[in-house]
Image (tube, helix red, strand yellow):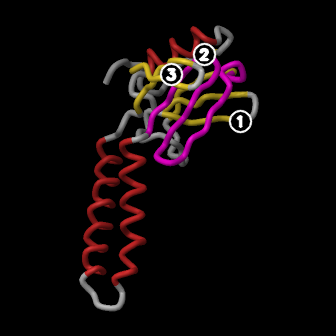
Amino acid sequence: MSAFPSAAGLYLRFRSRIDAWLGGVLLLGILVSCALAIGLLLQKGIASLAVAPLLAAGLSLWMLVETWYGIDDKELIVQCGPFRTSVPISNIRAIRPTRTGVSAPALSLDRLEVIHSTGTLVISPSDQVDFIRALKARNAAVEIEPFEGVRPLRGGQ
C-alpha cells in the first residue's frame, strides 16, 4: 500500500495480487507476441502486420504492471492497464471473498467482490486486510461477508 496524489488529495494505492500461473501465462503471451512480431518484421511485404502482435504484447505488459486499486476519501479507483473505473465509496454495500474466474481487473483468483448500488466489481488487492480496513474507515456501513470456504484474509504479500 502506498499513498499517491490525486486531484482530491492523497489516495491509498493497493497493487493487485498476481498469481504465479497467471503472471507466467501473461509473460509467455508477451514473449510469443514479440517473437511473432520479429518474424513478421523479417518478412518482405508483410512487416506492417507486426503491429498487431506488438500491440497485444504492449497491452498485456501494461496490464501486468499497472493493475492497482486506489482509495481516496470519496472513491474506489480501479486501474488495469489503460482501463480505469471508479465507484463512489458511499455506494459500496458489501465485500465478499470469491474465487470466480470471471474476467475482471484482477491478476489473481484470490479475489474480493465489491458489491455497490449499481452492480459488482471483482478485484484482487495484494493486501486484502488493509484494503478492507481502508474502505471501512471511509464507509463504516460496508458489510464484510465471512471468508468461509475461501482462503482467509492475509495481509502484505
The residues colored magenta run: 67-92
Amino acid type assigned to the residue bearing label 2 in the image: Asp
| Foreground of the two, 138 or 116 | 138
> For the residues marked 3 and 2, what is the alpha-carbon distance in whole angstroms?
30 Å
> Secondary structure under badge 1?
strand
Q: Residue at x 75, y 28 (%)?
A: 117
Residue 78 percent across, percent down from the top left: 54, 35
Amino acid type assigned to the residue bearing label 3 in the image: Glu
| Foreground of the two, 1 or 121 | 1
| Foreground of the two, 77 or 19 | 77
Graded by Cα atoms within 10 Å as few (under 14), some (14 to 19) or many (20 or more), the crowding at tag 3 reads few
Q: Is residue 30 above or below residue 37?
A: above
Q: State yes or no: residue 71 in magenta.
A: yes
Residue 148's tag is 3
> For the residues marked 2 and 1, what is the alpha-carbon distance in whole angstroms?
21 Å
The residue singled out by tag 2 in the image is 73
Majority secondary structure in the magenta region: strand
